[in-house]
Amino acid sequence: CGFALRQAPNYAFKTLFNTAAEGSTLGTEFNRNLEAGGTVKVIRDPRLIDQADVIFDVLVDQREKTVVGVNASGQVREFQLRTRFNFQLRTLAGKRLIPPTEILIQRDISFNESAVLAKETEEQLLYRDMQSDIVQQVLRRLAALKEL
Amino acid sequence: CTVLGLGHGSIAHAQAPAASQDPAPPPATSVPGAIPRRDALAGQLKSTSMLAEQPPGGPGIELPTFIYGDRLSGRPELETVIDGNAELRRGGSSIRADWLQWDQPSDVVKARGNVRVNSAGNLYNGPELEIKLDTFEGFFTRPDYRFLQNSGYGVARRVDFIDDKRLVAYDANFTTCQRGEGPSWMPAWIVNASSIKFDKEADVGEASGGVLRFMSVPILAAPTFTFPLSDKRKSGLLPPTVGLSSVNGTSLTVPYYFDIAPQRDATFSPTIMSKRGVDLAGEFRYLERNYRGELRASLLPNDSLRDKTRWSYNYLSSGVFNTGLSAVGGLGFILNLNRVSDDNYWRDFPSTVLSGGTNGLSQRLLANDASVSWGREYFSTTVRALKHQTLQDVNSPIVPPYDRFPQLTAIYKRINAPLAGIGGLDYSINTDYTRFESDRLLTRQPNAHRTFALAQISRPWIRPAGYISPKLMLNSTAYQFDGPLINGARSASRTVPTFSLDSGLVFERNASFFGQAFTQTLEPRAFYVNTPYRNQAALPNYDSGLNAFNFATLFTENEFVGNDRISDSNVLTTGLTSRLLDPDTGAESLRVGIAQRVRFKDRQVRLPGEVPVSERLSDLLFGATVNLTPAWSLDTTVQYNPKTNISERATVGGRYSPSNYRVVSAAYRHQRNVSEQYEVGWQWPINDLWGDQGKDLGAGRGQGPGRLYSVGRLNYSVPDKKLVDVVVGLEYDGCCWIARVVLERTQLGTIARAGTGSSNSTRILFQLEFVGFSRIGNNPLKTLKANIPRYQYLREQSTTPSRFTNYD
């Protein structure tokens, strides 16, 4: 029904500098997926920033946690985890290619005081999953950019 | 809010026809077909680098002086007299008057008749002015004034200019309430004082012998008090709050904000409670280059309700500590400390900063967590201590969770690296030693030392069309118990290998839905895990739990979270996701996903007390996220058992937000046999009911004067058949003042309590905020921001207006 295997995304740039901290898990995952297409090289050395066609700025990368469910005894039974990610893409000269864009992802997690250690690990797993989701959504947005 | 001209006099002072010999400034051109000028308040005008925000000049720079008028006389280089439509401009200042004399040697200007001064956007009007131009030193008689920064204005008997940043107004008044219609209009609030010193460098007004009146009623009188002249951070009073509470009686909170330094501030919020005494609460925050922190604490000496002193603190800090040793470098640290004086604290102070939210974990379980970490290239290590304070209630006791005291971890992790001649490998070794401690009588199992090592190696092949990633894991764990287990053992060990294979494909096509073009994707995923069975039935459980059933956990190797149980698995999880992407921006408009797990043999490893399940097919997991337009969003996850036709767990949430200050959100959350709740939250202007749509002034500026907003959040628990959490409120925006009433009801247990005879705490809060008199932001009614999803403050710190806003 018209579906075909995805082709390598045709990025409008050849080199990108990522301002996310080198070694941050999001930065690593982003760089790896971006380079997987084979057409883009991520510049990692800040001294070589002028070789980059585009600069990827992470403006906000924030994790939030709020109570969304309390039982009649006043005990928390549901939390909502959110990841708020805000980025922009620009040229070194300052031309904005993608204006600051927010991606907000949320997941609900049940809670029980006695199982807090298990919930802590589960929370980390959900945050990592949201991060992968964000990376994929950001790459889609970068691929949609037609020209510099 | 409207911006009008000065109290009297017309703002549009026609440009005086320049004498023919004068170099006439270029007239304001009106090009046919040019973009019509829009309301500057709505922020439609763009700044241009052609207009310098800082007036030119400075010490030692002589700026040219321009003069215009009907008749010009005088002696060159000595004095100049302009009669009729006189105007003098220099730098960012202009003076207009009926008559004007400029004495050049002393640089003094005298002006009479309809004198109008514009000094970098600040306006002064009056009959007589004398001023030294270069120092801006002089006086103005019977002037009215209007400041650019916060649109504050007033009149005075006399104004003395000390310099261009400071002036003193005598027998003066001040308000930010903009003039309304009709001769009987009165400002909602006004300060009258024998003198007001305006310091525009510090952005502070200081009234001596002043009285603040609201609706003509004096509500504050003091020998001196100060108020801010801009949105800039300033020390000062924050709007006080009056509360009526079923637990605390009548209360009054008067917060004071201290602006200590650009990177440090503090808020002191004493509260007088009629049934308890005086609660001294405070907050101190700092933000440095390498570290940051927030400390909140409160102390209520001799609580008359419980005959004891009550206190709480919460300290959050994180950063990098530089050891100064080049071989070691920096150490990262994170501190999150929470403690309260007693088990009843959460009932008596349900709205303290500790309750709910991320800081304290939950109302009845407070974490004290400290960790120090160090990393170098592929190696990282952490030392951590985690202790909990559990607030017990005899009617709903909590089995206290284990403390990690201490936990030591070391991780070596390589990504996309070669090993033994094979490239592109991800591999890691995690080691962890933890001492688990809790109350043995309540947990009914011995405390322990646990050590484990987890080695993993995988080789992912990632291509645009898909990926495949085989992975091998080995988990080896050893325990030393404080006491014997049921089988008499004082130690135990276990080693479990795991093989997994993760793979996915991405198909794409161009499609059209809802009259819109999309890129539609179809992403099948298959994840296979094989882990042999190892008997773990005798092992206690410290940090393991059964995974929640969601898209993240379905695609992980272990069916348990934590490290005390490693599930024996021979399972295949399949999933299918489809997305609609906007082809122009790549934004995700819609996503639907479905997943299910197929088990080839029953799982034998179980948690203590877990019932054995013999199912080949797991529940179905269905998820959808819709963001077709920015105004609407929908997010839903359903875990469905196809055999019993029962939904095990469901979360459905939607939001409609067509503009600033208009948002409605609703959610339904269901965990079978645990909880079932409906939640509704909103912020909506009530004026919409009679068709008054207000003005879109942007975020943080309200929607114009005279508007009433309704805000709230309700949580209804189906099994309890009652509202378990209620926050409803009204906010009135009178433009230069805001009034709030908020009703809050918090659930404190199922049993009615002695003393109040109620199982919940109800309180009503009242607040009056004078915009431009007390500091904006840091609203003490944090309740609204914390409880109402996507609540927006009616006023938030805004950018400084351009001096060209008031240009003439």
Image (cartoon, coloured by chain):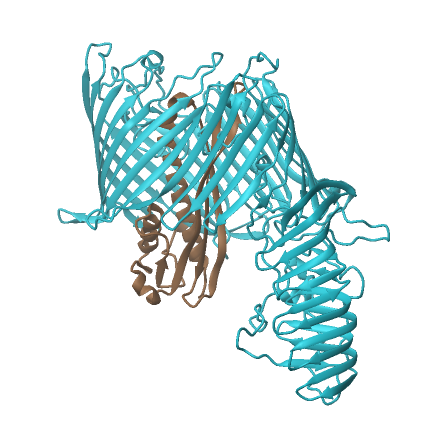
Chain colours: A brown, B cyan
> Residue, x 21% and y 51% (percent of image)?
B326
Q: Residue at x 55, y 43 (%)?
A: B257
Within the image, what quadrant is residue A124 found in?
top left
Residue A56 screen position, x and y as percent: 40, 57
Q: Nearer the viewer, residue B597 or B779?
A: B779
Using the rendered view, name the quadrant where residue B799 is placed.
bottom right
Q: Identify the residue at image location x=57%, y=41%.
A: B256
Residue A65 visible from this viewpoint: yes
Q: Nearer the viewer, residue B601 or B338?
A: B338
Position in image of residue B219 (x %, y %): 72, 40
Image quadrant holding the C terminus of chain B, namely bottom right
Front-most of residues B107 and A134: B107
In the displayed structure, would residue B139 be above or below residue B108?
above
Residue B163 is left or right of residue B98, and the answer is left
Residue A66 x/y as whole percent: 49, 34
B128 versus B645 height, above or below: below
